[in-house]
């Protein structure tokens, strides 16, 4: 024993505890620098034989699985069809290629670290704990992202004379009128169960504060809407409230008004400093397993001892055999990938229907919106562009990139049919109706129609409620040693947290199986 070298010792540890044990023992002996941050899951490959894992797709789900399994001692190989890593987590900057089917674009924004837009994820809420865990673990700086900005506009071409009005004004007046109605109802005690006198007093007070009513329970306007004039050196003059009937007749209350009420959109939100793809870069920095891009999976065959994956790389058909396979390929694309899954499982994959979000970024030569008092946040319009987002970063710089359209379903179909140049022109004309001279500020633009992006052809997949009971659990469970993963198999599709959660779910399931098999082997 005296002559036991470190190498021999590690060999003995390996024989007893597998590669994960070697890794951990090496760390303890100071032979290996623990460069990576802590894994989120406590996975550990038991047994002496190193297990192999094929990971299909290098989006957030695939990268999470690679990171966690690599640290647990598995041998991971990642196969990605696209030319880039990250999947839907895509930040567009100068020179980037937008891989749209049949009409690729090259981003012609200036070469400036501030001039980018997030074509996929753009917002992180504080309760998405998994994504925040990895951001912290990988030292990815985050900043606050303004989502709802009361200084931004509500614009409806057929209401308010087609003029944009400030979100603050709309919200203040809507609350004022609703509160006045409530106050009147309390006066008449017009409820099916009469209110006690004490409750009436409390309710009147509530309405008064909620809507900023006067002593008589009337709404006559409020400084919450911003002043018509003055406010600093002279007394502020209240704005004339919008006619209640005009407000009711408009449509913003039906959608945009409740935006912050959605828990995932509640302020404050966050974003990665410098672009959301810094999350992807964080994973790439911390993963050693090979990631092969431009490698398209073409067939998946389940066997008794694992999974065979056939893929095309640079025109050559290759085979990868692995003990386990984690598959994040968009389920609607699985229809075109031959496999020997059960019919029900395949039916379940098809039952996940893709959406088609569309985003368009415009480089503006001046940050004209800041002259209108708008710093970050969103303007809503009933035009096809639906929204204009103002960047929360680069405040008071010369130039900025606005999100000039963010659409879904039918509105996305409209943009999908246009050429990239036509989309920019159209979005510019819509912007002109909100901001004077908007299209004159446009220097460059690119668009990302997720329904037409190669290797995606859709996003935000969801199952119709009638299919959910039949198929959701089925496709979330493994088929042999193959797991379907990604936000598509979570109840939080269109959010990275759904992708992380699904990865975690599949990993824990596999871990349980591996441990159980190892326990049986150990007894044998
Ligand atoms: C417009 C938009 C806005 C969004 N906003 C937000 C937001 O604000 N906040 C947030 O947290 N999330 C947001 N999301 C959701 C977020 O982008 C996703 O939840 C997450 O990126 C999904 O990761 P994934 O790994 O599940 O799938 P993907 O990223 O789709 O990864 C799948 C991978 O499979 C690859 N692939 C496809 N076919 C093959 C094949 N045959 N062989 C090999 N590889 C293949 C693809 O190229 C891709 O890289 C948004 C998404 C979109 C599109």
Image (cartoon, rainbow, N blue to C red):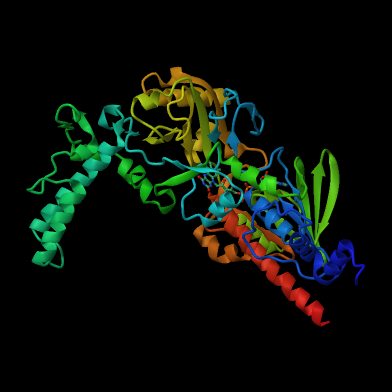
The answer, for residue 178, to whether it is visible in the render is: no
Closest to the observer: 408 or 259?
259
The structure residue drawn at horizontal position 15% and vertical position 63%, both measured from the top left corner, is 191
Quarter of the image for the N terminus: give it.
bottom right
Q: Quadrant of residue 29?
A: bottom right
Position of residue 57 measured from the top left corner of the image (x, y, whole percent): 70, 48
Asked if 306 appears above or below 146 in the picture, the reply is below
Asked if 239 appears above or below 124 in the picture, the reply is above
Position of residue 157 measured from the top left corner of the image (x, y, whole percent): 33, 30
Closest to the observer: 138 or 440?
138
Position of residue 170 measured from the top left corner of the image (x, y, whole percent): 26, 39
Closest to the observer: 205 or 191?
205
Please give left or right for residue 145 compared with residue 490 in the image: left
Please give left or right for residue 484 compared with residue 144 in the image: right
Quarter of the image for the C terminus: give it.
bottom right
**Outermost residue, right direction?**
3
Asked if 517 appears above or below 158 in the picture, the reply is below
Position of residue 359 measured from the top left corner of the image (x, y, whole percent): 52, 35
**Outermost residue, bottom direction?**
523
Numbered marks: total: 0
The answer, for residue 213, to whether it is visible in the render is: yes
Please give left or right for residue 376 compared with residue 409 in the image: left
């Amino acid at each position: 024993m005296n002559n036991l070298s470190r190498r021999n010792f590690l060999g003995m540890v390996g024989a007893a505890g597998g590669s994960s044990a070697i890794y951990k023992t090496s760390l303890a002996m100071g032979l290996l620098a623990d460069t990576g941050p802590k894994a989120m899951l406590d996975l550990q490959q038991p047994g002496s034989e190193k297990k192999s894992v094929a990971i299909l797709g290098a989006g957030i789900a695939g990268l999470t699985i690679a990171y966690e399994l690599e640290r647990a001692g598995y041998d991971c190989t990642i196969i990605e069809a696209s030319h880039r890593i990250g999947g839907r987590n895509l930040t567009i900057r100068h020179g980037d290629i937008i891989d749209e089917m049949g009409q690729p674009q090259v981003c012609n924004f200036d070469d400036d670290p501030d001039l980018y837009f997030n074509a996929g994820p753009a917002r992180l809420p504080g309760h998405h704990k998994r994504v925040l865990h990895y951001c912290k673990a990988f030292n990815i700086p985050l900043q606050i992202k303004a989502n709802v900005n009361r200084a931004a506009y509500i614009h409806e071409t057929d209401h308010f004379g087609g003029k944009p009005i400030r979100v603050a004004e709309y919200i203040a007046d809507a609350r004022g009128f609703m509160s006045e109605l409530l106050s009147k109802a309390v006066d008449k005690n017009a409820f099916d169960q009469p209110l006690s006198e004490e409750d009436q007093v409390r309710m009147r007070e509530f309405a008064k504060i909620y809507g900023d009513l006067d002593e008589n329970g009337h709404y006559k306007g409020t400084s919450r809407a911003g002043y018509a004039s003055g406010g600093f050196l002279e007394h502020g003059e209240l704005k004339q409230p919008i006619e209640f009937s005009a407000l009711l007749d408009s449509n913003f209350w039906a959608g945009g008004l409740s935006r912050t009420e959605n828990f995932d959109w509640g302020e404050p939100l966050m974003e990665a400093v410098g672009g959301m793809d810094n999350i992807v870069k964080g994973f790439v920095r911390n993963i050693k397993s090979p990631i092969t891009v431009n490698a398209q999976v073409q067939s998946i065959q389940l066997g008794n001892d694992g999974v065979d994956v056939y893929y095309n790389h640079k025109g050559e058909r290759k085979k990868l055999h692995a003990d386990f396979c984690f598959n994040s390929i968009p389920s609607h694309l699985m229809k075109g990938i031959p496999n020997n899954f059960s019919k029900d499982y395949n039916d379940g994959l098809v039952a996940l229907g893709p959406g088609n979000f569309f985003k368009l970024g415009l480089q503006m030569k001046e940050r004209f919106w800041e002259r209108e008092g708008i710093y970050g946040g969103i303007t809503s319009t009933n035009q096809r562009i639906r929204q204009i987002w103002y960047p929360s970063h680069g405040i008071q710089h010369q130039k900025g990139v606005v999100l000039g359209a963010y659409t879904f379903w039918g509105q996305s179909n409209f943009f999908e049919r246009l050429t990239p140049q036509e989309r920019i022109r159209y979005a510019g004309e819509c912007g002109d109706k909100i901001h004077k001279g908007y299209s004159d500020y446009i220097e460059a633009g690119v668009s990302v129609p997720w329904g037409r992006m190669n290797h995606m052809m859709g996003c935000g997949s969801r199952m119709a409620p009638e299919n959910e009971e039949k198929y959701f659990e089925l496709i979330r469970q493994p088929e042999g040693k193959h797991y379907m993963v990604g936000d598509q198999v979570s109840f939080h599709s269109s959010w990275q947290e759904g992708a992380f959660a699904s990865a975690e779910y599949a990993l824990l399931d596999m871990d349980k199986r591996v441990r159980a098999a190892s326990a049986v082997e150990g007894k044998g």
